[in-house]
Each structure stands twice: as structure tokens, then as C-alpha cells.
Amino acid sequence: MKRARLAVLISGRGRNLGALQAAVRDGRIEAELVGVVSNRADAAGLAQAREAGLPVVVVPHADHASRAAFDEALAVALRALAPDIVALAGFMRILGEPFVREFEGRMLNIHPSLLPRHKGLDTHQRALEAGDAEHGATVHYVTPQLDGGPRVIQGRFSVRAHDDAQMLAARVMDEIELKIYPQAVAWMARGELRLEDGCAMLRGRPLREPLGLDDLEPGFR
Ligand code: GRF
């Protein structure tokens, strides 16, 4: 079987990108990483992509007069990579419906909260202000509803009395994001994870609730 073509979109530090790169390198994700696309030329995460010799494409959002024009430029860049999987990894632009529809079923996002709680920005601060007992991160399919697409896997932990927003951000990244995102992309690369009629399915089983940390395969724990 032909290996899946994986494209990753970033805007920032690229720790999730680093985890995906590592999992591709050691074969846990059976895919070819065909390119990294950023809306910011100064995204720190681009350095590791360049070091690894990956094709890097920058589509600066500021160069485009409208959201639709930016989306189209981004779509042109992505089409050239012909991806089977598009992983939004800290990609901080909202994508319009035509773009999302074009890549729907192939596109995943990772969001730093226990969706459907805390869609959007400042999730760690908002979890604290809400007095949440638990916090975490979610991998979901991207649909036109912001942070609202079918959930695939979600990792959670108990919030400690002394956790501040910065500590929560670090825990979410280290304890959850860097584990669940490579796992979800690995399932997709193997063709085990699919979106059918708006429902996420793993090996033919509908995911009415997202999978959890207990479902991680040994290589991803
Ligand atoms: C992560 O918390 C991700 O969930 C959020 O932005 C952060 C990106 O970090 N959307 P990085 O660029 O992967 O280091």
C-alpha cells in the first residue's frame, strides 16, 4: 500500500510538529511527511522542519486582503503537496468553509481543552476561572464549526490547587498533546481512523465518545 502523505500546518513553536516528525522518523506513523506550511515566516517550529530537510512553505496571512484570499493561497500550497492527511498543529488561523470542505475527512486539529469545553483561545486560564476539576486536550476532525468537529481522542488530568495557566499549558503539552496527536495521525495513516457521515470511526467502530489515554498503543504512551 502507498504510504499516506502527511502535511502539517503550524504558526508557532512546533512542539506538536516535532512529535509528529519523530513518530514518522521512527515508523510509528506510517506516512511520508511531505511538507510543513506556516502562516508566519517567523514560526519557531520551521527551524526543525528545515533541519530535517522537509519542504517548508510560508503563506503569510498578512499578505492577503481577505480571509478568503488567504484561504485560497493556503489551499493552493496544500494542493501542491497532495496530502492524504492535513494536521493542524498549533495553526492559529480560522479557516473558512470552502477550505474546510475541500480537506474535510483528511484534516485533524489538536485543541488544548476538553472539548466541547473551552473552544477558542485562552483555554488554560478559562479552565482555571471555571474551577474545572479536570483539564486536557482533544484531537478532532476539522469541520466548519470552530473546534466543533467530531472528537477522536482526548487526554485528561486532574487540576492541582497550585496549577496556574502556564503550568496547565505545560502539562497539557507534555502529558497529553505530545502523546495523543501522533497516535491519532498514526491511526489515520494506517487507514484505521475515518470520518463517515460526519462520525469519527476507528476500525469501523463509531466514536460516540472520544478515545482516551488508556487507548494509546504502547509506542505512544
Ligand atoms: C498547542 O497547545 C495547541 O493545542 C494549540 O497551540 C499550541 C501549539 O503549540 N492550538 P506548538 O506550536 O505545537 O508548540
Image (cartoon, rainbow, N blue to C red):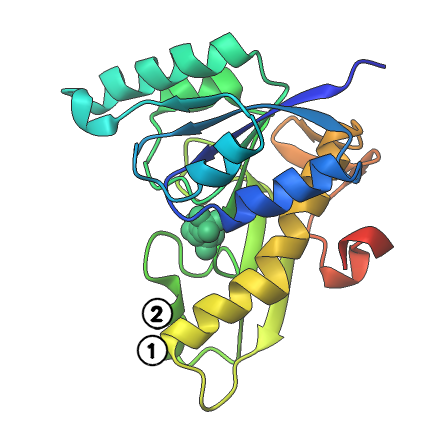
Q: Which residue in the structure is indicated by mark 2?
A: 126
The residue depicted at 45 percent of the width and 61 percent of the height is 117
Asked whether 31 or 190 is in front, the reply is 31
Kind of residue sitting beneath label 2: Arg
Asked whether 93 or 131 is in front, the reply is 93
Label 1 to label 2: alpha-carbon separation: 5 Å
The residue depicted at 78 percent of the width and 27 percent of the height is 191
- Does residue 217 show up? no
Q: Looking at the rendered structure, which numbered label has been put on residue 201?
A: none
Q: Which residue in the structure is indicated by mark 1?
A: 129
Mark 1 burial class by Cα count in 10 Å: few <14, some 14-19, many 20+: few
Asked whether 161 or 119 is in front, the reply is 161
The residue depicted at 39 percent of the width and 41 percent of the height is 146
Q: Secondary structure at mark 2?
A: helix
Mark 2 burial class by Cα count in 10 Å: few <14, some 14-19, many 20+: some
Task: Please tell me whether residue 29 is drawn above or below residue 179 in the rendered image.
Answer: above
On the image, the x and y values in percent for residue 86 come to 55, 27
- Locate the N terminus by quadrant: top right
Tag 1 and tag 2, C-beta contact below 8 Å: yes
